[in-house]
Amino acid sequence: MSNKQYSLSDLILDNLFNLRGLFGSSYGVAYALAMKQRKVSAREFGQAVNRMRSRQLLEITEKNNQRFIKLTQEGQLTVLFVKAKVQKPREWDGKWRLIIFDIPENSKEQRSILRGLLRDNNFCKLQASVYISPYPLNREAVSYLSRSGLSEYIRILKVEEMDSDKELLKRYGLKRITKNHGR
């Protein structure tokens, strides 16, 4: 997405995400980067930051008389969901992508977030804690799973054959690719 398509808030969130804002970024650096990408006054920047702070998308901390902006988990997810939208390939490669997970009970919220991420990426529930799609999971989503620590509870598989995928083919409007081996 180009910078012009982003709202100022989305631009700031995206910049913080790219700067690994989950660890914190200097307020001044975040402002300078926004200024470089779009003409924005200090007042507009501050108002956007305050709105996002009230929506609990980011937090501001102070250390050694310097202000830092840090994405909250909700802010990270907001950026991730925007970035993680998968563009459907023109042609299906004939392979299914399976996501299998077993996230501990004390992480119910993260499990719920993962399910939403998968649904937003054209995955459907095959059975409990198993989701499937003909399309790959976007790199941003995979990167988030690694950073969030969830990747240790998740397996991502690429499957060429299934016992019966008629319903899935119908659901996704796909046709089975037949391999011609010169016969």
Image (cartoon, grey):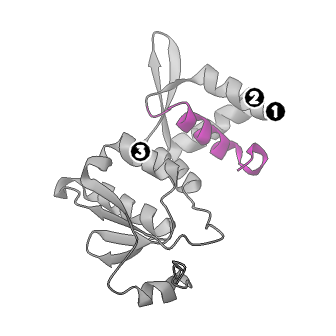
Callout 1 secondary element? loop
Residue furthest top in the image? 64
For badge 2, the amino acid type reads: Met
Q: Return the residue at label 1.
A: 39
Disc 2 to disc 1: CB gap under 8 Å:
yes
- Distance between mark 3 and mark 2 Cα atoms: 25 Å
Q: Return the residue at label 3.
A: 73
Which mark identifies residue 35? 2
Residue 74 visible, this orientation: no
Q: Does the segment drawn in magenta span residue 7?
A: yes
For badge 1, the amino acid type reads: Lys
Q: Position of residue 4 (x, y in %)?
A: 78, 46
In the image, is 79 to the left or to the right of 158? right
Q: Which residue is drawn at 49% across and 72% down?
A: 134
Region of the chain picked out in magenta, as a range: 1-22
Q: Nearer the viewer, residue 67 or 36?
A: 36
Q: Residue at x 75, y 51 (%)?
A: 5
Q: Which residue is drawn at 55% across and 85% down?
A: 175
Binning the other alpha carbons within 10 Å of mark 1 as few (below 14), some (14 to 19) or many (20 upward) gives few
For badge 3, the amino acid type reads: Gln
Q: Which of 128 and 179 is in front in this view?
A: 179
